[in-house]
Amino acid sequence: MAALDFAPFAKLKSLLVLEKAAITDYPQLGEIVNRVKVAFEIYLGAKLDLATYVHSQFQQTATRYIYLPALPIVSVASVVLDSLAQTDYKITAFGVVLPAAIQETSVTVTFSGGYDSTSYPPAIEKAALTQTVYEFKNVNNMGSTSVSTEGGSVTYPELGLLTEVKRMLAPFRNASVMVPL
């Protein structure tokens, strides 16, 4: 799925008052949208694209919870613990819950998760549009914390996701993401 599915060009064109017909006419905009999508995935602790994933981990500490890195979880094809297929598990919004705690165990889960191009929640799309518009309008000042001219100065937040964007994304963060970025 293209990154533009979550920040549609038609909406960006309207918000930015762009005149040209295609995103290819604005190469920086396409790069910004891709960068914003990657930043969202890092912040959320989850892939956004609907796909089939294979998640492997070695679970050292005792837990019943296996957090999967693509949300929402659509389906689980298999759960394998130390090379043994499991059938007794519950699929949740964040991954899989096992009937008993595991520890010092190799885990492999094959699952489908993420959003298709028509299922992004409005809050994620709005956050994507907000961050993309902000970065596009300030592309010449990226990395600057302030810019001074004869007429005065402007202070910018540090490079990264805007506070308001993080607030919009917070309900969608993977439960395994323990510290704010």
Image: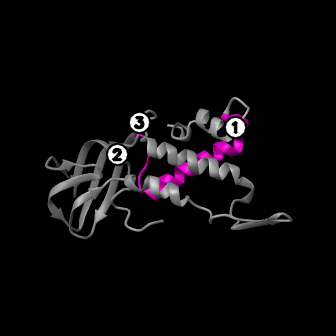
The residue furthest top is 21
- The magenta segment: 23-50
Q: Which amino acid does label 2 sit on?
A: Pro
What secondary structure is marked by label 3?
Answer: loop
In the image shown, does 120 or 102 lie closer to the viewer? 120
Residue position marked by numbered label 3 in the rendering:
119
Q: Which of marks 2 and 1 is nearer the N terminus?
A: 1
Relative height, residue 94 to residue 62 (above, below) = above
| Residue at image point 20% right, 54% down | 97
| Distance from the alpha carbon under mark 1 to that under mark 3 | 26 Å
Relative height, residue 13 to residue 124 (above, below) = above
Residue 55 position in % (x across, y down)? 34, 52
Picture quarter containing residue 158? bottom right
Q: Looking at the image, how many numbered discs can be counted on the residues?
A: 3
Q: What residue type is labelled 1?
A: Val
Residue position marked by numbered label 2 in the rendering:
72
| Residue at image point 67% right, 41% down | 16
Q: Do the residues labelled 1 and 3 touch (CB within 8 Å)?
A: no
Residue position marked by numbered label 1 in the rendering:
17
In the image shown, does 138 or 53 lie closer to the viewer? 138
Q: Does the magenta stretch include residue 30?
A: yes
